[in-house]
Image (cartoon, coloured by chain):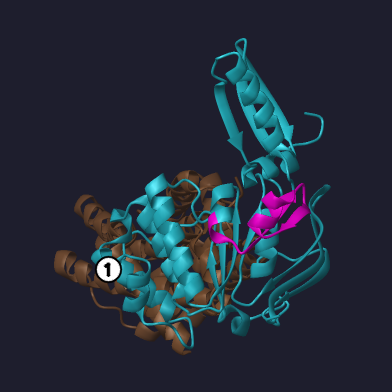
Amino acid sequence: MPAAAISVHGLRKSYGDYEAVRGISFEIAEGEVFGLLGPNGAGKTTTIEILEGYRPRDAGEVDVLGFDPGRAGPSFRERIGVVLQQSQLWPTITVAETHRMFAGYYDRPRDVDEVIKLVGLEEKRDARVKTLSGGQKRRLDLGVALVGDPDLVFLDEPTTGFDPAARRAAWDMIRALRSLGKTILLTTHYLDEAEQLADRVAVLREGQIIREGTPAELTGGTNETEVRYRQDGHEVVIHTTEPTRLLQELTAAALAEGREVEGLQVRRPTLEDVYLSLTTPEER
Amino acid sequence: MRLYRLQLRWEQLLFWRSRESAVFVFLFPLLLFTLLTAVYNGRIYGRPASWALLAGMLGYGAATTAFAGLALILVARRELGILKRIRSTPLPPATYLVAVLTSIMLVFALQAVSLFVLGKVLKSTPWPQNVVSLALALALGAAVFAALGLALTGYIRSLEGSSAIVNVIVLPMAFLSGSFGPTRHYPQALRAIGAVLPLKPLIDLINGIYLHGQQIWDRPRAVAILIAWGIFGMAVAIRKFRWEPREG
């Protein structure tokens, strides 16, 4: 078991009367990509900002790279890279200048051109930031987070607002980061993103972790298969642990009557189904 | 120290690269001075009008550059998330802020020199005699206004309204303090308001030094009022300055 890059025990945080994070615990190993998944208001950003050192916590133990982020100084910040949910950079200077400025803040920065290449902005190297597209600006954000050669990268909703092509490009970049051996904590409310990128996922709802595991464990936790078809114009949905037998019966009956089973679909639950069943309040 | 010098260089690049700051913050007082000297003639405070207008414009420059300019730059950076981003790096926050303040003071210094050159070219205004006193007075004024500018950022909630708020403060203050001409003929009430604002003592100080050959220590009252404003500004800034944009 590799050493933990992040360990959190019993973390709590309230804003006034509102308890945003209600006693969560998790560990992230070095080199792991960990996803905090949850709907808006679940406490993802509060959690990540406590770990980044932006917010004090009310209770709990937090260890990030051996530091307490609530009290850590420059030596902690040497080792982390942060992409905030919403942030922009100076519009009037170029991509290369922005990277150089941030590189200057670190003791051992990465080579600026190498980082620009890594985030795919070589062609925009000398373009002013205001001329970049939304996706390119987000890549610049990531480049700036990497220029200090951090061991740990925080990505708060890295692809929110992207078109599908830009999302795929961002995913490729995040996979490239993992291959550099970086530990990555990302928050997202997109399930496919967590499924695609994260080694392990914690699902947050109302400030609590309600499920944690690999994407496969989360979807594999339930053995049910969903079978859908149409009968007399009505949609029939059956959840079954014996899909083989159900299908046999269904199709045999149809064959005997010489008709098609209309609109037949058989599918395994996706992470999305698990997530929805977890994050939607019970009364539905 | 290395980080400070580095950041100061970047701050200068950022200032001059932005057309808004270069034109509106740096050039505006020079433009206003040109216009005012074109319409005012005769004598003010017993000296040619252009001398007094130059002194008034130096005070206005301190307010518009170190106070308004600084506040606008910092609010914009805060609301764009740049300040928050900077805080995630090893650059110490104090180093960053001192570099930003020094940078704006440098801009003001250059502006002051340009005003003297412009005055010389347009109206043959004399070079200042008590250069050390004048430099001290201008540096004190700029520092006080920078502290007040830092404090003001805590009260500006959004980027959209920021330049309106700043102008509503700076323009009436400049008018009441005699930046655009003498205040002797103003009603008593307006003069009383002007007298408690920070710009009036600064302009009095500059007038005394530039027009009447005084030294900065000849006007301890003006210096004391300025310092009091500076302390007030710092105290408010320490409580109210924020690094993060308003949520939502």
Magenta highlight range? A196-221
Answer yes or no: is residue B69 visible.
Answer: no
Answer yes or no: is residue A111 visible.
Answer: yes
> Residue under circle 1?
A122
Which chain comes out cyan in the rendered image? A
Seen at 67% across and 48% down, the residue is A38
Q: Is residue A251 left or right of residue A23?
A: left
Look at the numbered disc 1 and give the secondary structure of its residue. Answer: helix
Whole-percent x and y of residue A174?
48, 64
Whole-percent x and y of residue A185?
61, 65
Q: Is residue B194 magenta?
A: no
**Three-letter amino acid code at disc 1?**
Glu
Q: Which is nearer the eye, A121 or B213? A: A121
**Name of the residue lying farthest toward the left:** B121
Q: Is residue A219 magenta?
A: yes
Whole-percent x and y of residue A71?
72, 77
Which chain comes out brown in the rendered image? B
Q: Is residue A68 left or right of residue B109?
A: right
Seen at 43% across and 52% down, the residue is A167
